[in-house]
Amino acid sequence: MDVFEKLESTALKLRNMALSSCQSPVLTSSKEEETLTHLLSMKHLLSNNFKLCFPLAVFLEAELVLLMSDFCEINLIHKNILKDVRLKRFRVRILFFSMQVTQAILENLKRKGKEAELMMATINHTLSLCSRIEKMKQESRETEEQLLEIQKKRLELKKLNNGKMKEIQELKMMCDHPERGKYSEILKQGQKNLDKYLQMVAVVKNVFQGIIIASKVNWAADSKLKDVILGMEDNLIVE
């Protein structure tokens, strides 16, 4: 008799006791000992079964956790794949609609009438605007490159001017020496060089002013260009 059959027989005895108003039959001492031994053996079997089933339950729970994590990862991969498929489908639909629109426009252009003439005029005007925009972009890029070159030259002249100013200051400090007459020619030459570089700076500023006025660039909207222009000593006249 296995454990489940013993449990079933015990449950039947308890049911019979309940039906007979909880009046259990009188058991002899030998039967009581047999019943006690039976219950102890059942307890021992249940304890052994619990010890065997507990590691199995832990193992099953761990496997369930791994399966859930794998399921979440697979679900995420499927979502990404579905997202890519939807995006590709959307792009294909847009391409298909654009082809349909292009085909409809071509068919309407083949027909003669006011609608076709108006559509052709609109297309020509759009193409003209696109070419003008590209041309203006190219001119803007060229102007920006010219401005960058002018800024580089201006920085070089500024560094050179600072160096010459330092030389002049050193010469002036040397002039404070009693032998001032010895350095008079050096001071004159330094003053000539300074005047020369100042004239070069003035020419660069005039060229920069001419480029700004000719290109009609809104320098007030560009912060960097605005700082460069406001940093110049001469006032620029912008239309």
Image (cartoon, rainbow, N blue to C red):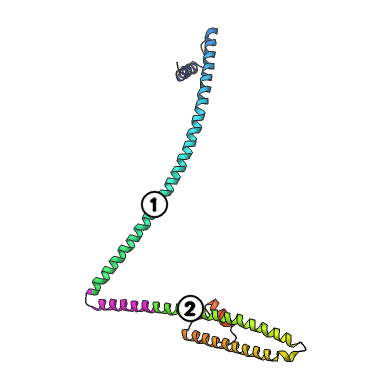
| Alpha carbons under labels 1 and 2: distance apart | 46 Å
In the image, 55: left or right of 180? left
Q: Main secondary structure of the magenta part?
A: helix
Q: Amino acid at mark 1?
A: Ile
How many circles with numbers are drawn on the protein? 2
- The reply to whether the magenta stretch includes residue 118 is yes
Residue drawn at point x = 38 percent, y = 55 percent: 84
Residue drawn at point x = 61 percent, y = 80 percent: 159
Q: Amino acid at mark 2?
A: Glu
Q: Name the spot of residue 187 as percent of width and height, x first.
A: 68, 89
Residue reaching furthest to the front: 182
Residue 26 seen in the current view: no
On the image, numbered disc 1 is attached to which residue?
81
On the image, numbered disc 2 is attached to which residue?
145
Please name whichever residue, 165 or 114, is drawn nearer the observer in this view of the structure: 165
Please name whichever residue, 226 or 111, is drawn nearer the observer in this view of the structure: 226
**Above/below status of 57 relative to 160:** above
Question: What are the residue bounds of the magenta stretch?
Answer: 110-132
